[in-house]
Image (cartoon, helix red, strand yellow):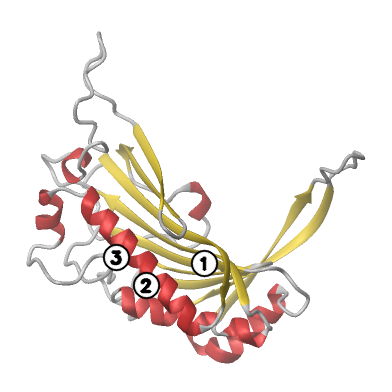
Amino acid sequence: MTRDTVPQRGQWAHAPLVFVLAQVRFLPSATAAPEHLRDAIVTRLGARFPTISQTNSVSIEINLDAAPNAPRTTPAVAYDLVNNDVNAMVRVQQGALTYAVTSYVDSSHFREAWLDISEALADVHVTTVTRLGLRYVDFLVPPHGRRPEDYVNAPWNLTGMPTLPGAMRGPDLHVSMVDVAYHVGRMRLQFMRGFGVPSLPMDLQGMLSPRQQSAQASPGECGVIDSDRWVDGEHRADRATLSQLFTQMHTDVSSAFRTMITPLARREWDPEAATGDNT
């Protein structure tokens, strides 16, 4: 990744992709405490993530046994490792390892960088992960004369929804979510449209700030596509297993995205109809 004036966002020429995240979760242990996993990543990749910050918070444990007990608070420490361009970061938490970017070459490049990071799990004796996740966020900022609905198929574009009696027009604000089962794991697709400047979902804020490629002259209609694919269950934490699972999850997210968007979106975001995809 380089300090380009225009961030790289995959192989589509005008991809609306602004944020990509990969995560694994694992059972907490003394050897895999956040500070130990942080040190393992620094030993392997410290030059790639020279800036390290610590976050302290409090977690609340509630005992649901028959005998009632007062909730217990325990300190929680997390570490963020950030690269020089502030477009890639690693977050280390108790029982979780996350990699997020706002600029990347393509899905293969992202996956290999993520697998390099995940190899540090072996250094702290994590051999099994209990959840894997892959998430993509796209910002739709239509040019003049277009609307967010022009870029997504039904049911996201509300085709067939009547204007309510007495209303001036259709909805100004619309949030749609579908949760779909796969042979292994699930995917949650969300489409949000409204007015103003698009922003990351609340649970992703506080990580990296997206750099919009072309903002509107003034705030107008915009939309956000949030694609979240995950797999639960125990899986080996070796590179080959993680690569296979994340490759499959990427294939599923990419296929869902292509199904979700309209021919207009394909033309504007991939005008040369390249063989690659924006995820």
Whether residue 248 sits left or right of residue 235 in the image: it is left
Quarter of the image for residue 237 reads bottom right
Q: Please give the name of the residue rendered at 51% of the width and 81% of the height, measured from the top-left corner.
A: 117
CA separation in Å, label 3 and label 1: 16 Å
* Residue 279, numbered circle: 3
> Considering only vertical position in the picture, is 270 above or below 63?
below
Whether residue 178 sits left or right of residue 74 in the image: it is left
Q: Nearer the viewer, residue 34 or 50?
A: 34
- Judged from this view, the residue extending furthest toward the left is 272
What residue sits right under mark 2 in the picture?
247
- Which circle's residue, 3 or 1, is located before the other in the chain? 1
> Considering only vertical position in the picture, is 234 above or below 243?
above
Query: Horizontal and vertical percent for residue 106?
Result: 29, 74
Report the mark closest to the observer, 3 or 2: 2
Few, some or many residues within 10 Å of mark 1 (<14, 14–19, 20+) = many
Q: Please give the name of the residue rendered at 37% of the width and 72% of the height, measured from the top-left corner.
A: 247
What residue sits right under mark 1 in the picture?
23
Q: Nearer the viewer, residue 154 or 106?
A: 154
- Judged from this view, the residue extending furthest toward the top is 166
Query: Horizontal and vertical percent for residue 175?
Result: 37, 35
Q: What element carries label 2?
A: helix
